[in-house]
Amino acid sequence: MIFSEHAIVSIFSGFPVRTRDTRPKASIPVTAAPLPPLDPAFFDAAQTAKAWPFEEARKIVARLKKTGKNEALFETGYGPSGLPHIGTFGEVARTTMVRHAFRVLTEDRIKTRLIAFSDDMDGLRKVPDNVPNKEMLAQHLNSFIRNADIVKMANLTFLTGLTGSSSDGVYKNTLFYPFYLYSRNCLGTSLDVFVNCEKYNTELFKDIPYLDVSAALNDSKRAVVLNVINKNETKAIVTDIVLQAGEYTGNAKAHEINGESVNSTNTAEKEDVKIVTKDVRFKGNTIRYTFPAHSLTQIEIPVK
């Protein structure tokens, strides 16, 4: 293969994409984590401690005496208010502190349990607007396809809500469209891809390709589906797509998801990020295509 100044993506044969198995699964028993041992030297001091966890724990002790129960159940939970942050940790940490104070006050003679609930949407039943952008989501989806031989099922919490809501109404957020394209078209057989393009470095990793690529053979549509994320925030990348095997019609469709910047968002009044579809004509088994900066492009290439 001759490499030019353009990026090159080569597509080979592959293996089946694993779709989500919705059949009932056997239940998995939940085992309680072991509790840390208590130091008896603190038992007497706990009786007069003024710290707020001990004040709250005393209320629970008094309540148990009234009800006659011999077990204290502590519950906590959290839903996303964006990416995980110190407040997410605090929701569980505070309850754990009260539980520990209760154990010290009662010298651990009363059984305790802690149950933590985790929600993947906020109080309005949607994913917050400041979760990772469409390009980051698409890279995760590409990874699932490229590793379809070992990934049996994949779940993305924080990314399961695809609509936003405001006083102006309900709208499709920026994550809706990647899920829409992948769920409709990336079915069948995952294909191996080879990518040669410009790379970049970070503090942790070196030689990361600007193009993140996956491909699938959709038997029902009789098409090769190519997914390309251009992670370069400022530069479009001209690419030669080389189809290593098969015969093609010479007509393809490209679906581009993009906005003015990587921070573009959608609202009920304005849709900055959406799908734009265009026809692509080519000859033989090579397609030259320019992937815009900070974009996700899915190309459907019909097979003869």
Image (spheres, helix red, strand yellow):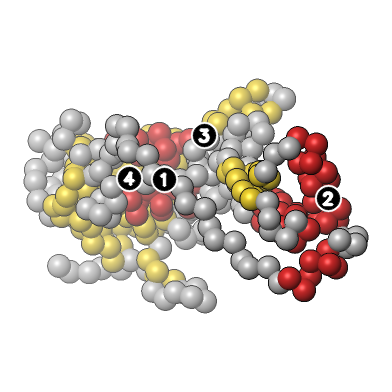
Give the percent coordinates (x, y) of residue 152.
28, 47
The answer to which of marks 3 and 1 sits earlier in the sequence is 1
- Residue 250 horizontal side relative to residue 124, left or right: left
The CA span between labels 3 and 1 is: 31 Å
Specify the amino acid type for callout 1: Pro
Task: Please report whichever mark, 4 or 1, sits nearer to the chain's N-terminal start.
Answer: 1
Residue 289 vertical placement versus 22 (above, below): below
* Mark whose residue sits in front, 4 or 2: 2
Which residue appears farthest toward the top when viewing the image?
A: 169
Q: Residue 92 placed where, x, y %?
A: 67, 52
Q: Which mark is residue 29?
A: 1
The circle drawn on residue 115 is none
The label shown at residue 58 is 2
* Distance between mark 2 and mark 3 Cα atoms: 44 Å
Density class for disc 3 (Cα within 10 Å; few <14, some 14-19, many ≥20) is some
Q: Is residue 48 left or right of residue 9?
A: right
x, y percentage for residue 216? 23, 45
| Residue behind mark 3 | 162
Spatial distance from mark 3 to mark 4, Cα to Cα?
Answer: 19 Å
Residue contact at pointers 4 and 2, CB within 8 angstroms: no
Q: Nearer the viewer, mark 2 or mark 3?
A: 2
Residue at the image point whose x is 41% and y is 53% from the top: 139
Which of discs 3 and 1 lies nearer the camera? The answer is 1
Please name the residue that numbered disc 4 is placed on: 153
Q: Earlier in the sequence, mark 2 or mark 3?
A: 2
Residue 210, quarter of the rendered image: bottom left
Tell us which disc is closer to us: 4 or 1: 1
